[in-house]
Image: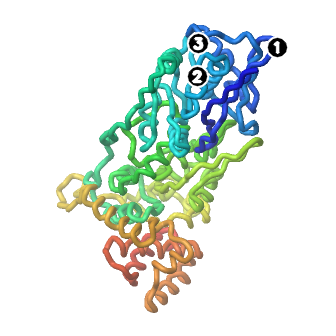
Amino acid sequence: MSLAAVYSRALSGIEAPEVVVEVMLSSGLPGISIIGLPEAAVREAKDRVRGALISGGFKLPQRRVTINLAPADLPKSGARLDLPIALGILAASDQLPLERLQNYEWMGELALDGRLRPVRGVLPAALQARDAGRTLVVPEENAEEAAHVEGLSIVAVGTLQQLVALFMDQQPLPERSVGGIPATTVKVPNLSQVRGQQVARRALEIAASGGHHLLMMGPPGTGKTLLASTLPGILPPMSEQEALESATLYSINQLEFDPSRWGIRPFRTPHHTASGVALVGGGSHPRPGEISLAHRGVLFLDELPEFDRKVLEVLREPIESGRITISRATAQSEFPAQFQLIAAMNPCPCGYHGDSSGKCHCSPDQVRNYRSKISGPLMDRIDLQVEVARVSSGLLTGIEAEEVEASGVVRARVVEARERQLARQQCPNHQLEGELLEKNCLLDRESQQFLTHAIERLGLSGRGYHKVVRVARTIADLAGEADLTVDHLAEALSFRKLDRER
């Protein structure tokens, strides 16, 4: 009896748990069996591995081959275990020195001619291989993705034959160095393209500074979508940890890694026909949905009332918790979902309610029914609610002069305000809770009386009250002021348009 064990990684949500591929050769009829909760693609690995070994000129053991994927109670899916299975068979049959395999982790799909094909989810596996102190061996197409993990030793190979030749020559495997982070190539609209809309521009700056959720309501063609699309250009740059978190979600969701988007805050714009599963994620092998792909970035929902109400309701818990848990019969998968919600809507079914053009003929009941498609609990979770009115013809044509700030100018103020927040409380203002909220948002007597009157008049809930205080804290940070004043609270309350209309 011969026994060999090599290391690899499975994929479970955004985690990459260690898998030990144990290969045992024993007496009995020749054949290969795989145990340890393998799913269809893993069970088919025996045929891919057999073809790759024969094509590479290796000896296929004429004995009973049993392959155990430990831990046995962890489901394994995909073709990422092809390479470690092949190496385990070669080591168990003394065609490779087993001791040289122990400091490596392996993953890759095998073609029948021995070529290595790329697999999903290399980035989370790379992070955990680094923490385990092992070198990660991946297909050449996955090397650039894995190379973004600082401190990880990487080996990229093209074929099984090439890999075995390196071992048999007793030469060290050629490790790939971490390349420089590519320059940003993604272009976003500039705030200087927006005419008028000073209130909406101010709300956008506050939202970017504190990470607050924003709803813009106004007639068609007033610039709501353009305003939303400028947000990535004024958001603070991503930290290295945030870039890794975002890239990890894309790594497990798609095969091709796009290095040009490294460090770019995601901006997701699902269509209003999207289902609840498309937003939160799911499937037999759970994958992240739009809210997770927008992690550390922006989720823009245009034409908000056109979304199915049940679909919108699934956003309520992730907005509060910053994560989503998908349960299946055999396991649970948890994905992060700390996104910034930006939404746009028309004021009525025809879109022109309250507009100076006088085109609207919707009845009060029609307007009320249209807006009621967005539930009160969901609306209560949106920090800023502003009206985007029609821009005058003079501003549109350039006859009226207007001083317009570019995105770079606004972003400088946003970054400065965000740095104040991180230095004071180690999180953006929208995440302030409990003691941190009370400590950093102290109100003097005058501010308390003003806010008490506003709560009674507007009927704010406890959540609405806290959101007003958080927004006021952001307004003070933008002004560089340490204490909250009535002016800060008054401006924060001015961005609760739908509360004022109740």
Q: Distance between the residues labelled 2 and 3?
A: 24 Å
- Residue 155, given in percent of the width and then of the height, sits at 46, 29
Which residue lies at the image location 22% right of the left edge and 57% below the top edge?
A: 394
Q: Which is more N-terminal, label 2 or label 1? A: 1
Looking at the image, is 219 positioned above or below residue 130?
A: below
Q: Which of 438 and 143 is in front in this view?
A: 143
Badge 1 marks a residue whose secondary structure is loop
Q: How far apart are marks 1 and 2 (CA)?
A: 24 Å
Residue that carries the numbered disc 3 in the rendered image: 112
Q: Which is more N-terminal, label 3 or label 1? A: 1
Q: Which amino acid does label 1 sit on?
A: Gly
Q: Judge the density around disc 1: few (<14), some (14-19), many (≥20) Cα neighbours within 10 Å.
A: few
Looking at the image, is 55 positioned above or below residue 125?
A: above
Q: In which quarter of the image is the C terminus?
A: bottom right
* Residue 183 left/right relative to 131: left
- Residue 119, given in percent of the width and then of the height, sits at 54, 29
| Residues marked 1 and 2 touching at CB (< 8 Å) | no
Q: Which amino acid does label 2 sit on?
A: Pro
Residue that carries the numbered disc 2 in the rendered image: 97
Residue sitting at the far bottom: 445
Badge 2 marks a residue whose secondary structure is loop
Point out the frontmost of discs 1 and 3. Answer: 1
